[in-house]
Structures are given as structure tokens and as C-alpha cells.
Amino acid sequence: MLTVNFILADGSKRAVQIAPGRTVKEAAEDNLIPGVLALCGGTCTCGTCHVYVGDAWVERFAKPSIDEEGLLEGTAAERREGSRLSCQLPLTEDMDGITVTVPDQQQ
Amino acid sequence: MIPDLKQLDPAKFEHLDFDMYGQAIKSDPSKYFLKWAQQPPRYIRQDGHIHAFATRHKDVKFGLMNQEFISAVPVPGTGLDNIDYFNGLPIIVEVDPPQHTRLRRLMQPAFTPRRVAEAQAGLNALAHQMMDQLEARGSDIDVMADVAIPFAVTVLLGHFLAVPQQDWPLFLHYSHSMSLVGNLKAGEPKPKEYMDAYNAMYAYCEKLIEQRRVEPKDDLIGSIIDSDITTEELFATLMVLLTGGIGTISATIGLAALRFGRHPDQMELLRSDPSLINSAIEEVLRIDCLGNFRHRWAKKDFEFEGLQVWKGMPIALSLGAANYDPELYPNPEKFDIRRAPTDVSSFGYGIHFCIGQAIARPSVRTATLALIQRFPALRLATPDFEPLWGGLPTERSPVNVNMKIK
Ligand code: HEM
Ligand code: FES
């Protein structure tokens, strides 16, 4: 198990546990983290699972695909350095302690 | 090979006389959905064809998301291939990747928040302008003809696709003529009226591409044409956006009006606290899902939660029933605008998840709220009013919603 530290839109913090191999979106969903809508269910089609991955962690994930890029261009909250779609972020053992900020808007 | 009826366990069938496309489910789906939402996958027979039939939330979601066993490409001869609205053009909802990926990428630029925000900015003004016109008339209105349809047409053609108003008739004529091919048998020739509308629209798209290559414009059509798009693809893209949008948005506005008409207490609650509008429309989308069913086809033999499914078998997925799952939505038959339901299946899931939802939600919210706020006396024409039901066979779309506003 590894810990994901969510920072919610209101600034509050929630630390959750998840098994490696699962995605940041699943970590949010399983723990009822508000603000990650993930309307399409996780197929990189809706752009409503947008999160900001902490600076120290963002490089650890594979680069976004063309389709993720397309959706990131059009997220409801502003696109920033660490912007990613959380359904496209599988977690690995070495990401224990990762911080993920939830934007204030998904659509 | 799909076995025939006699070889399958009768206990695994939904009632054999049930008509998935009949008036019974369109007029009162809740009595079916309440039961179905708790039943595992089984078979159903429709027009002589055996389908796998999934109705629980998790099974519907699986059916729409799984790409290993399940395809969106219709298998000919399964009773669903007679509907050819687009004269054989590749339609985004009926293709798998990689074709699907290409078509979806062509459409995606249309749905950036900038475009959606541009369209949204006009929604309020449009809704109130329409209410002003109603105000000046008598008390009797048909929400479909007087509000929902003109609102949806103007949002899509005017604000969103930004088609010059003089060209609207061409689009509307084609969209209207599509109903002429809905009930044709496979191979039957298409009526002349349909083919004329099709040819006119095709010529328009050809001209548009030529024109925009010479003289590019930064509007939605510009962003779609901006690649090496073919005439067929532009035609299909524009028509899918238009027809996918008008009927769905207008039907949902009509469903919302009918639902509030039947629950005056909830209408009053919304009027007194308009900040409930988002939750209220999610609840309308949940309880009055436009799509009773969507279809898919098995790519290979597989077992679907204990049900044997054979390659080529159609799979009917009931979006409407999924929205009545009592675990996700306690007392599912209760219309409660404070419920704020999540994971509502009305826009589908997976790679075909509705590309237009970002524009559909605000459109339905704006029109419904304007109607309710502007007319405090809003009520059904008669307390037991029941509309005629139309739309595609799989949809629950009211033809008319008669109300009084004064
Ligand atoms: C309340 C209104 C609407 C409802 C209930 C609705 C519902 C749906 C559903 C259930 C699907 C998935 C179909 C499937 O997986 O088989 C879908 C797909 C689609 N919708 Fe909507 N829709 C609405 C509004 C719109 C609007 C406004 C547009 C366009 C402006 C639109 C365009 C599309 C397109 C193009 C697809 C196909 C996407 C794909 O195959 O990748 N829809 N819609
Ligand atoms: S859940 Fe839809 S894009 Fe991630």
C-alpha cells in the first residue's frame, strides 16, 4: 500500500491508502474525495478528473498521450505545470507520499 | 454461434412479450427500472432477435466501458441495422478505435471550455428572450414546440456551431428528414425527400470546406476543418453534433418540465432556492434518463456476470434502469432535487461518453430555471396530463408537454 496526500479545493488535506497499480483517480473515487468527477469512468474521454500533481512527483509519470493533451488544453480549471488527468496516472510503489491537489472546478 | 431460443434456459429471459421500444416503457419506465436495477444480466427477445440484457448500474457501466469483449460496431442481421440515418457515413457512436479515435479528435476542439463558455454566455439572454415572447401570449403552451425545440436549435446552430441563420433551413431539413429512414427495412431504398436533403447538405459541406481553405475563420467549424478532413467526415461531424444535440437537449428540457409539473412542491423549492438548479437537473437526468437503452455487440464469446454471451450477439444496456440502483440512489423512484446524485449514467461511459454533455447540462439548466422562475403559476395543462411519446425507438422523448403559464 502507498499513501496519496490529497489537497482539496478548500485547502483541507486528506491522506488515503491505495494499492500500487491503481490510478490516482481510483484513489480519489474509492475514498470519496470531492472534486474529482471522472464522469467518463476513466477512459481519458471527459477531462473531469483533472488534478495538479505535486512538483516533486510529476516527472515520475509517463508523458500525457495526444488525447490527454487535447483534454488538458480544455480543462475547466486553469492548466498548470502539474496538470494531469488522474485516470491516466497509475501509481507505483515508489510514489508513496505523493501529493495531489484537486482543482476547484471540473466542468 | 448464437443458439436459438429453444436451446436457452427460459428462466434466464426477461418476459418474452416485453417490447423494448413500446409505449409502455416510454410512458412509465419506473416500474420496470425499479425491478431491473437489481437483476443480473439475462436475455431478452426483441423483434425475433435474442439480446443479452444488462440493467444493473455496474453491468451497464461494464458494458459501455469494456473494449476487450464488447464493440460499438453493429453486427448486421441482429435487428438493429435497418436504421441508417446518415446514409452509410461513418458515425462516431458506431465505430471502435482507431476510427473512433480519429472522429473524436476531429470533434474535440468544438468542446474546449472557451467554445462552451462562448455558447453559454448567450444562453441566459436567449432563455429570457424566449420567456418574454411567451409572456406576451396566452396561458397555454407546449413546452416542446414553444421552448425546448427552438431553444435547442438556437443554442446549437446559432451559438455553438455558429452557422449563419440563412443556412439553418438546410440543416433543419436534413435533421427532420432523418425520421423518414428510421423505420425502413434493411436494403429498402431511401425516400426522395431524404435523399434530396442529404444531397443538399453534402453539397453545402463540400462548398464550406473549399471556402474555408481559401479563407480560414477562427470559429468552431474552422477548428474542425483545420485538418485534412474529407467532405464525408465534415458532413458526418456537423450532422452528428447537430442531430445529437437538438433532440437530446430539447427532450431533456421537456422531461424536466413534465417532472416538475408532476411535483409542484419540488418546483416551488427550486423557485425559492435557485442555487439548487445543478442538483435538480442531475436528478432530472437520473430519474428521467432520455436513453432507455444503448446497444453494443459481443466481439467474442464471454460470460457476463454468469450469463453466456456469444460472439456477434447484441447487448442491450439500460441506462435508465442503472439510474434506479437503490444502493447508489436510495428510494430511487423519489424525485428529490436535493439528492445531488453522482455517477448518473445518462451520458454513457467510456470512450463514447457524451461529448456534448458540457453544453447539454447548462442548456437544460438555463431553460428549465427560466421557465420556472418567470412563471410562478406554471403547471401541467391538466393534473393528469400525459404526453405522446416519440423519439428514437430506444429513447423516451416527449412529443408535447402541455402546460399553463398564467
Ligand atoms: C441532455 C442531453 C444529452 C444526452 C442525454 C446525451 C446522451 C448521450 C449518450 C448516452 C451517449 C453515449 C452513447 C453510447 O455510448 O452509445 C452520447 C454520445 C454522444 N453525444 Fe450526447 N447527449 C446529450 C447531448 C448532446 C449534445 C448537446 C451533443 C452535441 C453538441 C451530443 C453529442 C454526442 C456525440 C457526438 C456522441 C458520441 C460520442 C462518441 O461516440 O464518442 N450529445 N450522448
Ligand atoms: S475520468 Fe474521464 S478523462 Fe479521466
Image (tube, coloured by chain):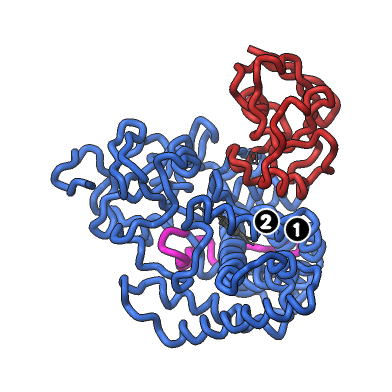
Label 1 amino acid? Val
Instruction: Determine the residue positioned at 72% across, 14% down.
Output: A96
Q: Chain of mark 1?
A: B
- In terms of secondary structure, where does tag 2 sit? helix
Q: Is A33 covered by the magenta stretch?
A: no
Q: Chain of mark 2?
A: B
Of residues B35 and B62, which is closer to you in this image? B62
Q: Position of residue B161 (x, y in %)?
A: 71, 69
Highlighted magenta segment, given as a residue range: B372-395
- Chain A on-screen colour: red
Label 2 amino acid? Gln
Residue under label 2: B108
Q: Is residue B81 above or below residue B98?
A: below
Q: Residues within 10 Å of mark 1 (few under 14, many from 20)?
A: many
Q: Position of residue B345 (x, y in %)?
A: 54, 44
Q: Residue furthest left?
A: B6
Q: Position of residue B322 (x, y in %)?
A: 47, 41
Q: Is the Cβ of the residue at disc 2 closer than 8 Å to that at disc 1?
A: no
Q: Is the stretch drawn in magenta largely helix, strand or loop?
A: loop
In the displayed structure image, the side of residue A10 where residue B40 appears, left or right: left
| Ligand 1 located in image quadrant | bottom right
Q: Position of residue B194 (x, y in %)?
A: 46, 82
Disc 2 or 1, which lies upstream in sequence? 2
Q: Residue furthest top?
A: A1
Residue under label 1: B116
